Amino acid sequence: MRRRESGYAVLAVVATMVTITATIVVGWATLATRVQTDGLAQVQQQYLDEVRLSLLGWYAGELAQLDRSAEPPDPATVLRGAGVAVRWGLRVAASERLVRESVSYRVIAAWLPGEGDASILESATGRFTPSAGTRWIVVSGFDLQAAALAETRARLDRLARQLEAAYRARLLSDPSRDATVNRFRALRCSAPSPGEMPCIDDYVAIDASGLVRAAGLDPLLAVNAWGAPIEVSNGVDASPVVPFSMALRTATPWGGALSMFAVSAP
């Protein structure tokens, strides 16, 4: 009888050991799976961070071209332009040209689809709605285009101040100090005197206007932040009466125009 009870005890111990061992094995397997999953998530996030940088770099390099069209670029164009290698089924989508605070821009979303992915970028609004379990990033061109717009306005302002300084210098060099003479424009257009600003009846690119030399303009300000020319006129849009003015303008990539005026001293 004791031998039988002893046998039952041994079997009980063995069963307990088997259960404990199985629990440990399952626990380690679960932990290993979790570590593997967490590791994959980290690698995928690093990949998406690299994609973000690539998209921003491409956008910055294409500021003058990317937002010319209202239509969104297709995914293949985005991936090729940004030099992104597709991994884990990466998907991208770009919005239509959006407008905020006089700035035109677009939004680009990139995501690693989950099972049954239904993620979507609303083209007309730039709003991205990811599916559950989707890893994603969104890149906006607003800050890039806003900075280019601000820089362009700053260049127009500097040009206007330089033209006004040239005007004052001409005024002060004239003993008569005649305030009724328009020193933004030569008195005789066919034969400007040395130092006079040439007659520019219609808008002309600054680097072709002769003003860089005549008014001492900074040639580095002859183009806007997108690389397009800044134009000048002392005919069209300029005031031929006191206070005299000279008109400056330049185009944005999305078809708008920025303008500013250099105005004679009172």
Image (cartoon, helix red, strand yellow):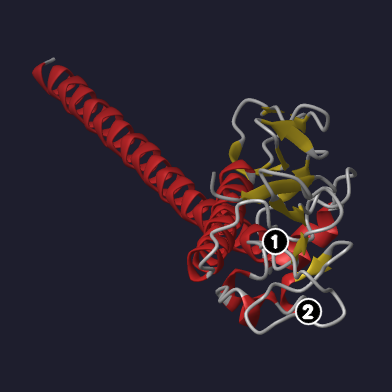
Counting every numbered tag in the picture gives 2
Badge 1 marks a residue whose secondary structure is loop
On the picture, is 195 further left or further right than 2? right
Give the residue pinned by disc 2.
208
In the image, residue 20 sits, relative to residue 60, either above or below, namely: above
For the residue pair 159 and 236, the one nearer the viewer reads as 236
In the image, residue 39 sits, relative to residue 220, either above or below, namely: above
Alpha carbon distance from label 2 to label 1: 46 Å
On the picture, is 201 further left or further right than 46? right
Residue 33: percent from the left, percent from the top?
43, 43
For the residue pair 184 and 161, the one nearer the viewer reads as 184
Kindly identify which numbered label has been placed on residue 86. 1
Pointers 2 and 1 in contact (C-beta within 8 Å): no
Disc nearer the start of the sequence (2/1): 1
Query: What kind of residue is marked 2?
Result: Ala
Query: What kind of residue is marked 1?
Result: Val
Badge 2 marks a residue whose secondary structure is helix
Residue 139 visible in the displayed image: yes
For the residue pair 13 and 142, the one nearer the viewer reads as 142
What residue sits 9% from the left and 18% below the top?
A: 2
Q: Locate the N terminus by quadrant.
A: top left
For the residue pair 151 and 112, the one nearer the viewer reads as 151
Quadrant assignment, res 191:
bottom right
Query: Would you call the spot at circle 1 few (<14 residues within 10 Å), some (14-19), or many (20 or more)?
Result: few
What residue sits 73% from the left and 71% below the top?
A: 206
Residue 8: percent from the left, percent from the top?
21, 20
